[in-house]
Amino acid sequence: MDPNLLAADLSCLSEEDKAKISSIIDNFQIRDSLRTYSSLTERCFSDCVNNFYRKSLGKQEEDCVMRCTQKFLKLSMRVSIRFAELNPDASTQ
Amino acid sequence: MASNNANTPSAFEREQIIGMMEKEMEYRVEMFNKLTHTCFNKCIEGKYKESELNMGENSCIDRCVSKYWQVTNLVGQLLGNNRPPM
């Protein structure tokens, strides 16, 4: 998340405020990573694990989870590229 | 804290600016996440036959993002018209 892309004018803030903002941005990124982790786990579990005859994951289930995760990450990358193309002038909202 | 200079914002104004920036970031992050999940649901089937995205999925994703963005703008316009400016 790039602070330069925000509409709010941050240029008049002090160093202390900028440090505050920096840590807010870091928190956002951490929170977002954790959210992605848990929602992706839930999604891939729901789609790939459908029976409980065994305690451990079978090879098929493992492969499915791997493909699910990779697909999501590739999709996420593609979405962010397309989104950036649609929204090049991000200083206006 | 009193400001000595017209260009230095007061403590209250600084808090406001930071608060606004936080809200804006929250909005953007949430919007991006919803966009990603929605397009995943619409474009990818739950079978996961392979880890690569095929051509059909790629086109679907591109169009999904484009349409989602158009809907965002449309809804924003409609909401803007029905409400007096803040």
Image (spheres, rainbow, N blue to C red):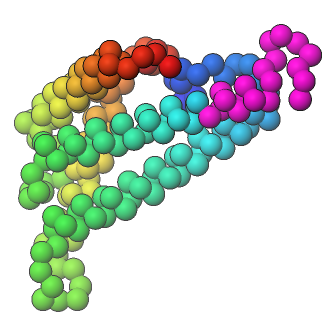
Report which quarter residue A17 is drawn in. Answer: top right
Q: Residue at x 8, y 58 (%)?
A: B47
Near-viewer residue (A61 or A2): A2
Count of marks placed on residues: 0
Report which quarter residue A58 is drawn in. Answer: bottom left
x, y percentage for residue A22? Answer: 66, 38
Q: Residue at x 32, y 22 (%)?
A: B79
Q: Residue at x 27, y 24 (%)?
A: B75
| Residue B72 visible somewhere in the drawing | yes
Is B42 on the left-hand or right-hand side of A43? left
x, y percentage for residue A35? Answer: 41, 55
Near-viewer residue (B25 or A86): B25
Is A14 on the left-hand or right-hand side of A40? right
What is the magenta range?
B1-19
Q: Quadrant of the C terminus of chain A?
A: top left
x, y percentage for residue A72? Answer: 26, 49
Report which quarter residue A89 is drawn in. Answer: top left
Q: Is residue B7 above or below residue A5?
A: above
Is B72 on the left-hand or right-hand side of B26? left
Near-viewer residue (B47 or B24): B24
x, y percentage for residue B41? Answer: 17, 47
Q: Is residue A56 above or below residue B17?
A: below
Q: Is residue B61 above or below residue B77?
A: below
In the rendered image, residue B9 lying in the magenta stretch gets the answer: yes
In the rendered image, residue A86 lying in the magenta stretch gets the answer: no
Q: Please, which residue is most extreme toward the bottom here?
A: A54
| Residue A63 visible somewhere in the drawing | no
